[in-house]
């Protein structure tokens, strides 16, 4: 080199790891001195610390023609083993500059592990420049550190360019291998050949994979069960791939294997390496190596005839393959005994049984028994080399049961053709049914189910149909010239069976309907300018018994042909028009003779109702009110009269009901309140006697006719006259009178809902007593006892005092 002398002094006594190549350096490093130098003409002699080996780079001659250039140093990496036990701080390297001979310098380091996180791992002695590690290192955490060394004077001025220092952490075997899964699951088909791949297990080691510390090796420690051999599987010691090494895998015998797998570092060295284990579970999957086998050679069943979707027999099979898999699910096929396809054998998804089912009706009269050959297979084919066995085929014997079947009509419906207008008691056809039960001796009876027009009858024994009315093609029950009637045939079985048949009668048209004019009503103006009416004819018959039609005006009355004319337009249409220039407004019925084209033809006189009216400029009738009044039909008049009669009847019924109601209210009226004077009155009885003693104040209630009334009741009707008593009153009669009044008041529907005062007044007539003025003068008065007056209440107390008691 032509540069100034660069000095690097280091101790080379590092502990070797025993490797010849020396690519990995382990052990504790000795002191290493790194010197900074400046570009100078004469290299200064190095200052070597005590106990450090000094390495001096040779200096260049002064007359060297090579020009030195200043550049940064490149320091080799420093290797430090992880997990060192100390003591700490542990010196790694010494950094010094050539300028420390003539002045004092200060050294420092920067970077992660020094002044950056994680801080405090590396420290440097600022005066001596010794770089030390302060704690154990972990390669799995940080594998290397990049530091930068600085040299400055006491004033902080940089005297050397910073140099980079790389510290590599040397790996130690301090981590065991770890499997990514503790339990590994794999599958292998049964019957697999040796060398079949099963699965791969993997393990990881946090140590350096470039060293033996991270190099793993795999092996199988155990196999359970050890059947048919103990070494059914092997594992690739480097990749962890598991394969089969022996034949004989049978799921039906050993469905699953469990292997214990071990992974060891240090390339599998059992003495120095660290190891770990995991479990590999290998499930032997099923293949179709066992065909289904019937549990019996012959199965039996029975079914009634004419029944479908009926299960006849259940076919059971056994299969050693895994249930509910395609290799276990059975598929059944009929291989013989059913040429017409009347049976099928679907599979029950739950039990795997074959369900022999009838899919087409079976006739006992045709075949009484069926013998089917059924084969059972799986959904997937058998594995190569496996043959189907004899037990995979079975026989099914089915017995058909005879049942009473319904009679049937053939053909159905039955079509016959008759002439329109066929008369009653005409024999049509023998509509008979057939009994399919050939082996049963039964009779058939017939009856009618549907005959809308009631034209037909059927003989219950022979089934012969005759008419009971005239067949009319124009009947509303005939559609498109077809009349449908339904009949029933019933056999004599127990229970009996019945069938129905439809008889269709096609009615050939005859000319039995005369044509009619259409429309039947129209209108025309008084002055036709021109004003023709288009008409046609309606005929219930069909061609050729209908149109073309011939139209003609009747000869009578005579004014028809004088006032009107008719012109044929086509075979079905004609025009009617006025022959005169003016016709008075009104309603005219024009007779028109229409003849059809039947053979023989039929004619009919139809009346065309024409309203002649005054027309406006547009040709429309303007006196609609007059025409409407003139054209009021008989039906409308009858309707109006009926409405008037019904209204009168309703009014009469209402009046009768009101009178009856008034009588009922009068009968229920118990009390009548007269407009009387509430003051007491003096009544005079004859003119005999005199004096104030003869004048008696009577209660106004005694002046009223006999009866009971309420003081709070308002009189509504005149007071009725009650019959008068013919004998003198007795206290018992008055009590009965009052009780009867109370009973009448309790039953009074017009009584108020609250308690009220009842006034009882009673006066008899025809009393045997004489005049009141002769009470004292009568010679026989002393013989009469008037004490009973005290029982009549306070109003008669005065009379009792006057005439009752002692002579005083």
Image: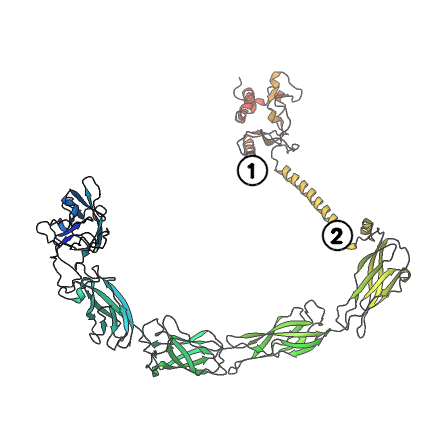
Colour scheme of the rendered structure: rainbow
Outermost residue, top side: 691
Residue pointed to by mark 2: 639
Residue pointed to by mark 1: 747
| Relative image position of residue 299 (x, y in whole percent) | 38, 80
Q: Secondary structure at mark 2?
A: helix
Residue 552, visible in the rendered structure: yes
Residue 778, visible in the rendered structure: no
| Relative image position of residue 343 (x, y in whole percent) | 45, 78
Could you tell whether 400 is left or right of 412 in the image?
A: left
Could you tell whether 610 is left or right of 80 in the image?
A: right
Height in image: 543 above or below 366? above
Q: Secondary structure at mark 1?
A: loop
* Quadrant housing residue 675: top right
* Quadrant housing residue 735: top right
Q: Residue at x 29, y 70 (%)?
A: 187
| Relative image position of residue 808 (x, y in whole percent) | 53, 17
């Amino acid at each position: 080199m032509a540069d100034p002398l660069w000095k690097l002094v280091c101790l080379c006594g590092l502990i070797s790891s025993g490797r010849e190549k020396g690519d990995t350096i382990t052990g504790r490093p000795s002191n290493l001195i790194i010197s900074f130098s400046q570009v100078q003409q004469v290299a200064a002699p190095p200052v070597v610390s005590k106990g450090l080996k000094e390495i001096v780079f040779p200096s260049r001659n002064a007359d060297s023609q090579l020009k030195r250039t200043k550049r940064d140093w490149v320091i080799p990496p420093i290797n430090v083993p992880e997990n060192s036990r100390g003591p700490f701080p542990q010196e790694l390297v010494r950094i010094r500059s050539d300028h420390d001979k003539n002045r004092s310098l200060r050294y420092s380091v920067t970077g992660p592990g020094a002044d950056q996180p994680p801080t405090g791992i590396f420290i440097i002695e600022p005066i001596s420049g010794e770089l030390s590690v302060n704690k154990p290192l972990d390669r799995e955490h940080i594998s290397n550190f990049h530091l930068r060394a600085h040299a400055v004077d006491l004033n902080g001025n940089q005297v050397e360019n910073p140099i980079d220092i790389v510290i590599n952490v040397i790996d130690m075997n301090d981590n065991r291998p770890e499997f990514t899964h503790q339990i590994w699951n794999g599958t292998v088909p049964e019957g697999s050949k040796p060398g079949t791949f099963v699965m791969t297990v993997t393990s990881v080691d946090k140590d350096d994979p470039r060293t033996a510390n991270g190099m793993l090796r795999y092996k199988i420690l155990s196999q359970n069960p050890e059947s048919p051999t103990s070494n059914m599987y092997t594992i690739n010691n480097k990749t962890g791939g598991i394969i089969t090494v022996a034949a004989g895998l049978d799921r039906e015998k050993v469905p699953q294997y469990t292997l214990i797998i071990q992974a060891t570092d240090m390339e599998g060295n059992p003495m120095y390496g660290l190891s770990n284990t995991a479990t590999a579970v290998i499930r032997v999957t099923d293949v179709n190596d066992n065909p289904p086998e019937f549990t019996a050679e012959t199965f039996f069943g029975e079914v009634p005839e004419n029944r479908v979707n009926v299960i006849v027999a259940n076919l059971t099979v056994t299969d050693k393959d895994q249930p509910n898999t395609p290799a276990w699910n059975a598929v059944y096929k009929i291989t013989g005994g059913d040429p017409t396809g009347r049976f099928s054998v679907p599979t029950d998804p739950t039990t795997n049984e074959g369900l022999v089912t009838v899919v087409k009706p079976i006739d006992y009269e045709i075949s009484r028994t069926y013998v089917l050959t059924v084969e059972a297979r799986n959904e997937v084919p058998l594995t190569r080399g496996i043959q189907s066995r004899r037990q995979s085929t079975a026989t099914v014997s089915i017995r058909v049961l005879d049942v009473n079947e319904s009679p049937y009509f053939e053909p159905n419906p039955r079509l016959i053709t008759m002439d329109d207008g066929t008369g009653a008691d005409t024999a049509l056809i023998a509509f008979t049914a057939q009994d399919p039960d050939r082996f049963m001796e039964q009779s058939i009876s017939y009856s009618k189910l549907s005959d809308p027009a009631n034209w037909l009858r059927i003989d219950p024994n022979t089934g012969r149909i005759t008419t009971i009315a005239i067949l009319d093609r124009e009947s509303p029950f005939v559609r498109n010239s077809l009349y449908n009637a339904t009949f029933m045939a019933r056999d004599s079985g127990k229970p009996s069976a019945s069938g129905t048949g439809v008889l269709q009668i096609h009615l050939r048209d005859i000319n039995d309907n005369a044509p009619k004019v259409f429309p039947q009503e129209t209108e025309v103006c008084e002055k036709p300018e021109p004003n023709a009416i288009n008409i046609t004819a309606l005929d219930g018959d069909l061609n050729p018994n209908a149109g073309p039609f011939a139209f003609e005006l009747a000869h009578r009355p005579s004014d028809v042909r004088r006032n009107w004319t008719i012109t044929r337009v086509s075979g079905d249409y004609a025009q009617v028009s006025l022959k005169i220039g003016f016709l008075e407004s009104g309603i005219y019925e024009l007779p028109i003779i229409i003849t059809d084209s039947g053979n023989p033809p039929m004619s009919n006189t139809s009346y065309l109702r024409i309203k002649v009216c005054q027309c406006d400029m547009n040709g429309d009738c303007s006196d609609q009110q007059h025409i409407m009044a003139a054209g009021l039909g008989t039906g409308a008049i009858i309707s109006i009269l009926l409405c008037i009669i019904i209204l009168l009847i309703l009014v009469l019924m209402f009046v009768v009901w009101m009178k009856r109601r008034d009588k009922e209210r009068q009968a229920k009226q118990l009390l009548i309140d007269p407009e009387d004077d509430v003051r007491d009155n003096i009544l005079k009885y004859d003119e005999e006697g005199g004096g104030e003693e003869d004048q008696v104040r009577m209660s106004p209630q005694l002046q009223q006719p006999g009866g009971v009334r309420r003081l709070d009741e308002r009189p509504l009707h005149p007071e009725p006259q009650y019959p008068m008593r013919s004998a003198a009153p007795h206290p018992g009669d008055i009590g009965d009178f009052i009780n009867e009044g109370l009973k009448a008041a309790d039953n009074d529907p017009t009584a108020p809902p609250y308690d009220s005062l009842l006034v009882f007044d009673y006066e008899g007539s025809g009393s045997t007593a004489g005049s009141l003025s002769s009470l004292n003068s009568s010679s026989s008065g002393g013989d009469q006892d008037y004490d009973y007056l005290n029982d009549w209440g306070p109003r008669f107390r005065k009379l009792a005092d006057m005439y009752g008691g002692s002579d005083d």
